[in-house]
């Protein structure tokens, strides 16, 4: 179980850590786990929740990056495809194969445009014809050949394309079919990296809602957001994994930098049964009318649609505005003209900021998506180096963490003890990938806990092989279901509060569960979960009311619009 008070006391008593990582998004959490596996004592902090910043706002794809072939980023695509294949093995409870299709509207169009784009002589959108797509998919398959676990691409003609997706616009001439992957619970995967690190090395510590607010010559000043207490922590190495807030963090550490230039991406979650049936488990990956790439695929019981790519200066000021919503809905509507696509079908939308390298480019599409590290070595008034982690993709976090960890280990004169290529993550350990074996495990948990098999199957989907621990907590509480959300249990919410570092009500609604993301955080649900959290987090009645107000604001829920939600992703 996670004990925040004990964690704070350990930090007070210890004071010195070889490595302090600022930012508990996917890159910071991945590095924390890697270093913990090597026996390095680390402190991980974040001003928000674990995985609560940009890492909670992706397209939720684990993919090679088909579109990066257009700009010649072959190394990035090869790395991403390799890491995608590894995540399918190491986190099979959350990372699933995603059959994907690319509609084609001409046979030979886009050949010149693709060449100019590849040579970076043009950033204008271009039509991707059948010839260009076939070449791209063949290259994509070849770059993803290492550790391959999914089928190769196929190309369908017009007749087969319309049989596959009958509501596509009539000028379709073909359909490129390939495989990528998706992550069901991105926020939980990030959290599991943190929990794995803590379990591997008990001398490590992780604290959410704790910000690096200042420094002196030898220490970082860390402020606990729950109590306001300030702690001095002395690192040998500080790592800034603040994502789009990297320059803000460096500013708090008395260094002026311009390492990051952000680009916001917005996504919609639609309640659209007809579109979901049309997609039939597939992602459609298509060029919008302005040349940008859009996507839509089934997400829980809804459809996820994305995304935009708009330069921004202040990551704390971004919103998903009506223009973006209208744009994404219109592009899906153009692709499926016989389906009605409307704003009232949006049950949730979210926006995050991609932490791209700071370059002088008006078009975010011109900015490289590879990762790098900027190092500020020690100086007269700072005894420790600061390593800032720039860019990167969700898919490649493990490899990025490994590269940074190797640099850190060299600086600490510490040998790597184990690789992470095949290291399972959280509930992915011993998770059966065969459906029959998964059903058998669900039945075993059902017999041991007396919960219905349909419930243990859901718990496996939510928590992987950690499901049995959750099921036992549910059983100990008498298997009482939530009144507002009967597929969840009171004991389940209690377990999250006790074992998963819950500090705020939004931690449960937005990140430990998918309730908000799927449009299910209605006022009654928020209130019922607040009652459970208040008991186990020891909130006063005043604090409970404050948490409800903050959660309602975060997911934009009102009694008259309980199915609409929005979330601005922020934190570092």
Image: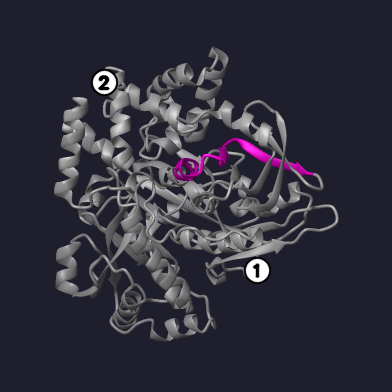
* Residue 432 to residue 453: above or below: below
* Residue in view at x 60 percent, y 35 percent: 209
Q: Is residue 295 magenta?
A: no
Give the foreground label among 2 and 1: 2
Q: Quadrant of the N terminus?
A: top left
Q: Is residue 376 above or below residue 492?
A: below
Q: Is residue 140 above or below residue 376?
A: below
Q: Which mark is residue 359?
A: 1
Q: Quadrant of residue 294?
A: bottom left
Compute the Cα span from label 2 to label 1: 55 Å
Residue 291: x %, y % from top left: 44, 70
On whether residue 213 falls in the magenta region, the answer is yes
Binning the other alpha carbons within 10 Å of mark 1 as few (below 14), some (14 to 19) or many (20 upward) gives some
Colour convention: one colour
Q: Quick one: label 2, few (<14), some, or many (20+) residues within 10 Å?
A: some
Give the residue pinned by disc 2.
479
Residues shaded magenta: 194-215
Q: Are marks 2 and 1 in contact (CB under 8 Å)?
A: no
Where is 137 relative to 526, above or below? Answer: below
Looking at the image, which is closer to me, 446 or 563?
Answer: 446
Instruction: Give how far across and how far down residue 142 sits, in percent.
Output: 33, 78
In the rendered image, the quadrant that contains the C terminus is top right
Residue 112 % position (x, y): 42, 86
């Amino acid at each position: 179980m996670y004990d925040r008070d004990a964690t704070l006391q350990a930090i007070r008593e210890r004071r010195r850590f070889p490595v302090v990582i600022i930012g508990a998004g996917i890159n910071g959490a991945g590095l924390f786990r890697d270093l913990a596996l090597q026996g390095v004592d680390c402190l991980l902090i974040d001003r928000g929740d674990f995985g609560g910043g940009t890492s909670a706002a992706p397209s939720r794809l684990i993919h090679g990056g088909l579109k990066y072939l257009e700009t010649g980023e072959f190394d990035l695509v090869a790395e991403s495809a390799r890491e995608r294949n590894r995540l399918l093995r190491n986190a099979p409870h959350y990372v699933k194969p995603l059959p994907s299709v690319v509609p084609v509207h001409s046979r030979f169009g886009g050949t010149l445009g693709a060449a100019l784009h590849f040579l970076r002589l043009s950033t204008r959108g271009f039509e991707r014809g059948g010839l260009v797509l076939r070449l791209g998919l063949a290259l994509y398959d070849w770059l993803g050949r290492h550790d391959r676990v999914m089928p190769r691409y196929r190309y369908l003609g017009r007749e087969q394309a319309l049989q596959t997706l009958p509501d596509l616009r009539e000028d379709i001439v073909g359909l490129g079919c390939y495989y990528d992957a998706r992550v069901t619970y991105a926020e939980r995967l990030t959290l599991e990296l943190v929990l794995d690190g803590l379990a591997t090395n008990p001398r490590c510590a992780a604290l959410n809602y704790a910000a690096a607010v200042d420094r002196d010559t030898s220490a970082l000043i860390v402020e606990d957001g729950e109590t306001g207490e300030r702690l001095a922590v002395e690192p040998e190495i500080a790592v800034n994994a603040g994502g789009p807030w990297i320059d803000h963090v460096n500013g708090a550490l008395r260094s002026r930098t311009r390492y990051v230039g952000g680009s916001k991406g917005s996504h919609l979650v639609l309640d659209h049964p007809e579109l979901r049936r049309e997609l039939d488990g597939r992602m459609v990956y298509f060029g919008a009318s302005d040349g940008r790439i859009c996507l839509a695929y089934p997400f829980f019981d809804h459809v996820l649609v994305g995304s935009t790519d708009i330069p921004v200066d202040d990551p704390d000021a971004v919103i998903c505005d009506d223009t973006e919503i209208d744009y994404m809905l219109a592009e899906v509507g153009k692709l499926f003209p016989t389906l009605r696509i409307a704003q009232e079908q949006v049950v949730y939308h979210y926006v995050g900021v991609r932490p791209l390298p700071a370059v002088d480019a008006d078009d975010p599409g011109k900015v490289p998506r590879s990762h790098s590290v900027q190092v500020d070595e020690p100086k007269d008034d700072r005894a420790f180096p600061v390593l800032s982690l720039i860019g990167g993709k969700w898919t490649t976090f493990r490899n990025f963490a490994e590269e940074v960890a190797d640099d850190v280990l060299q600086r600490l004169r510490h040998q790597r003890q184990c690789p992470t290529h095949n290291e399972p993550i959280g509930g992915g350990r011993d998770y059966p990938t065969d459906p029959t074996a998964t059903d058998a495990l669900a039945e075993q948990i059902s017999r041991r806990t007396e919960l219905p098999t349909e419930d243990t199957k859901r718990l496996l989907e939510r928590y992987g092989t950690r499901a049995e621990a959750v099921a036992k907590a549910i059983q100990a509480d008498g298997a009482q279901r939530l009144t507002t959300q009967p597929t969840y249990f009171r004991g389940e919410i209690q377990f999250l509060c006790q074992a998963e570092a819950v500090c705020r009500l939004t931690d449960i609604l937005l990140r430990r569960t998918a309730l908000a993301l799927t449009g299910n955080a209605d006022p009654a649900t928020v209130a019922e979960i607040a009652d459970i959290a208040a008991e186990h987090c020891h909130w006063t009645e005043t604090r409970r009311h404050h948490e409800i107000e903050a959660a309602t604001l975060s997911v934009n829920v009102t009694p008259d619009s309980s199915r609409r939600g929005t979330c601005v992703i922020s934190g570092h």
